[in-house]
Image (tube, grey):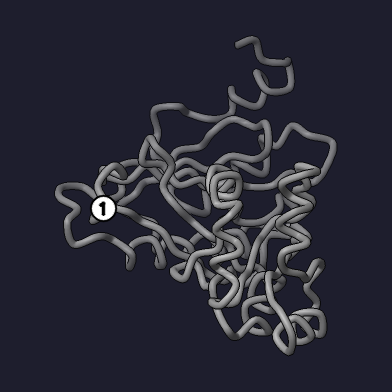
Amino acid sequence: MKRGKKYVDAAKLVDAEKLYDVKEAIDLVQKTSVTKFDSMVEAHLRLGVDSRHADQQVRGAVVLPHGTGRSVRVLVFAKGEKATEAEAAGADFVGAEELVAKIQSENWFEFDVVVATPDMMGVVGRIGRVLGPKGLMPNPKAGTVTADVTKAISDIKAGKIEYRLDKTNIIHVPIGKVSFGTEKIAENFQTLMAAVIKAKPSAAKGTYLRSITLASTMGPGVKVNPLRVNE
């Protein structure tokens, strides 16, 4: 894959063999951001688990203290009083069967997070095959299947992110914008790491945190020392 001159120049600032301390890594990620827009900083965590086994899944959600800097569109599946509650709480879209039909017939996906009340999961299940692969299926572990729609929406809008393993046992999550500065990004990162470490499955053997890489949008990756994530 051919890289542009900006990327090549930025990559020269990073020692590909070095494991950086957290704040040193974040400083580098900001210096090597190559976009004209305010890039997102992402964390990529390779874990020593096997996602093919149900007892080694790592999945959950955490509210980042400074949010992600990204505006999030929330779709809520609810009826009656809960639908009214969701609208009052600031949900971007609220509905039931009609939204399922819209997604099925129009391939409509102008939302980022889906919340559902427990009684609506039978309806939502009809589109599980399309929501699941996109990481949009509501899940109790992530707090997106809940009767307390007000809290769910409030947390999501405040910066709640969901983390989950992909097929290669890596978690990819946004932890803030480059413009946040080192301290805020570091606080977000450490909040994420505390949640992921707490979520370690009892069936996981050996080294849990295999590797950690931070990078800005389209920027080079910077490796973080997994033994020093809380410093």
Q: Which residue carries the number 1 mark?
A: 56
* Vertical arrangement, residue 80 with respect to residue 42, above or below: below
Q: Which residue lies furthest to the bottom in this view?
A: 81
Looking at the picture, tell me which residue is in the foreground, 35 or 124.
124
Secondary element under disc 1, as helix, strand or loop, is helix
What residue appears at the point 70 percent right and 70 percent down from the top-left corner? 76
Looking at the picture, tell me which residue is in the foreground, 44 or 170.
170
Quadrant of the rendered structure where residue 116 is?
A: bottom right
What residue appears at the point 61 percent right and 59 percent down from the top-left corner? 185
Kind of residue at badge 1: Gln
Q: Which residue lies furthest to the right in this view?
A: 36
- The image position of residue 34, as x and y in percent, is 74, 32
* Vertical arrangement, residue 25 with respect to residue 112, above or below: above
- The image position of residue 25, as x and y in percent, is 52, 45
Query: Looking at the image, can residue 220 be seen?
Result: yes
- The image position of residue 84, as x and y in percent, is 79, 85
